[in-house]
Image (tube, rainbow, N blue to C red):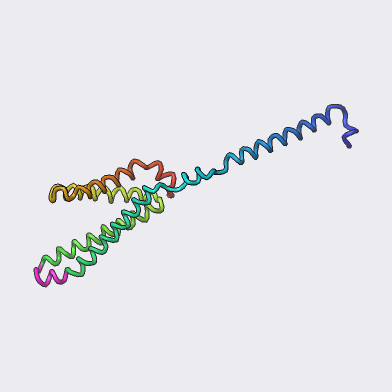
């Protein structure tokens, strides 16, 4: 059936449907354009520098503690030869440093990759270090203050920024 053979009104209906579909497609393209990211949105879609600093802090602390544990482990036999049972105490401290170092490295990896367990482990590590810093503050005076501020600040940052962490997180 050609357009000349159609009854009156049918041709007008077809034109309105064509016009309506063109209107929808232009609206859809405008909607599609609004979904695209602008350069300012792209910058906001990258993780916060604070999370990266926390991860680097955990990793650095882990490496330093592992190195300290290795030095203590190496010197445990020398201490044992000179001081007897004190070498066993040095060995226990070396193993503790190694364990804390590995835990810090694991927390650094978990927070860098935005794992849920990484944030929990990071809170545990920084909370434990905060308690240790309090003991250091009591035992050594103001020498423990920078450590207390750094560890408490890290714990606070991870605790307060739970929503931002979850936004980037992976299960």
Return the residue found at the far left: 83
Return the residue found at the far front: 39
Residue 78, magenta (yes or no) = yes
Above or below, comparing residue 18 to residue 88 in the picture = above
Residue 113 left/right relative to 122: right
Could you tell me which residue is drawn at 26 percent across and 48 percent down? 150
Residue 38 left/right relative to 72: right
Task: Work out which quarter of the rendered image holds the N terminus and state it.
Answer: top right
Which is more toward the observer, 51 or 168?
Answer: 51
Residue 154 position in % (x across, y down): 30, 47
Could you tell me which residue is drawn at 29 percent across and 58 percent down? 62
Residue 113 position in % (x across, y down): 41, 53
Quarter of the image for residue 164 reads: top left
Residue 112 left/right relative to 138: right
Above or below, comparing residue 116 to residue 92 in the picture = above
Residue 8 position in % (x across, y down): 86, 27
Quarter of the image for residue 20 reads: top right
Return the residue found at the far top: 8
The region drawn magenta spans 76-84
Which is more toward the observer, 89 or 140?
Answer: 140
Residue 24, magenta (yes or no) = no
Residue 59 position in % (x across, y down): 32, 57
Above or below, comparing residue 117 to residue 31 in the picture = below
Give the dominant element type of the magenta stretch: helix, strand or loop.
helix
Could you tell me which residue is drawn at 79 percent across and 30 percent down? 13
Which is more toward the observer, 86 or 146?
Answer: 146
Could you tell me which residue is drawn at 18 percent across and 69 percent down? 75
């Amino acid at each position: 059936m050609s357009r000349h053979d159609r009854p009156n009104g049918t041709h007008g209906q077809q034109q309105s449907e064509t016009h309506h579909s063109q209107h929808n497609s232009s609206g859809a393209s405008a909607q599609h354009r609004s979904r695209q990211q602008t350069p300012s949105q792209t910058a906001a879609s990258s993780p916060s520098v604070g999370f990266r600093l926390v991860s680097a802090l955990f990793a650095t602390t882990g490496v330093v503690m592992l190195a300290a544990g290795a030095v203590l482990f190496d010197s445990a036999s020398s201490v044992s030869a000179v001081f007897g049972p004190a070498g066993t105490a040095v060995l226990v401290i070396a193993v503790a440093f190694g364990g804390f170092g590995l835990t810090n490295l694991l927390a650094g990896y978990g927070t860098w990759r935005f794992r849920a367990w990484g944030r929990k482990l990071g809170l545990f590590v920084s909370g434990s270090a905060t308690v240790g810093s309090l003991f250091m503050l009591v035992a050594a005076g103001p020498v423990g203050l920078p450590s207390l501020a750094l560890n408490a600040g890290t714990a606070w940052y991870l605790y307060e920024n739970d929503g931002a962490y979850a936004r980037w997180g992976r299960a």
